[in-house]
Image: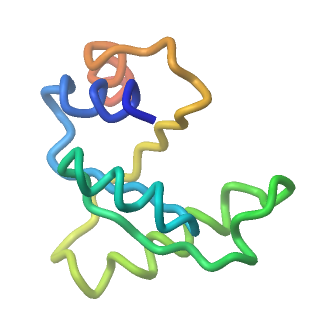
Amino acid sequence: MKYTIDDAYDSKLLRDFYISSENEKILALAKDFGVKTILRPTNLAENSTPMVPVLKHAINYLEPKIEKIEMIILLQPTTPFKLGIDIDDAVKLL
């Protein structure tokens, strides 16, 4: 998780980022790193849960709190081989 957080901070284009989890320890650790958090319901935290409902939950959580969501970038901690520049290059392609 820490590598992904570092990569997000290294990005020049990401303005805000959140971690979604049902695990209070993970959320507390994320807060220690200065990341905003979203408490995910346990029914969206199974190994077999598709990512689309998880992203929809995050969007529904954020919409009342953020004036405008311009885009969602999914950074999975299970994909550690990325750098901030890689994130920026991908965003520029959109």
Q: Which residue lies furthest to the bottom in this view?
A: 64
**Residue in the image at 54% along x and 37% along y:** 76
Name the side, left or right, on which 52 lies relative to 4: right
Observer-nearest residue: 34 or 75? Answer: 34
- Horizontal and vertical percent for residue 93? 37, 24
User: How far from the left and from the top, in percent, is residue 77?
Assistant: 53, 33
Q: In this view, does 27 lie above or below 58?
A: above
Q: Is residue 4 left or right of residue 12?
A: right
> Is 38 above or below relative to 13?
below
Quarter where residue 8 is shown = top left
Q: At x 47% / y 74%, what residue is drawn?
A: 39
Q: Nearer the viewer, residue 14 or 21?
A: 21
For residue 86, which quarter of the picture?
Answer: top left
Against 70, residue 61 (above or below) is below
User: In percent of the image, x 34 and y 64: which residue is there?
Assistant: 37
Task: Give the side of residue 90 with respect to residue 85, left or right.
Answer: right
Quarter of the image where the C terminus is located: top left
Q: Is residue 69 above or below residue 14?
A: below
User: Which color scheme does this rendered protein use?
Assistant: rainbow
* The N terminus: image quadrant: top left
**Percent coordinates x, y for residue 16 in the rendering:** 20, 52
- Expressed as whole percent of the image width and height from the top left, the position of residue 28 reads 35, 60
Displayed quadrant of residue 70? bottom left
**Count of number-bearing discs:** 0
**Residue toward you, 35 or 84:** 35
The residue sitting at 16% across, 76% down in the picture is 67
Furthest residue toward front: 25
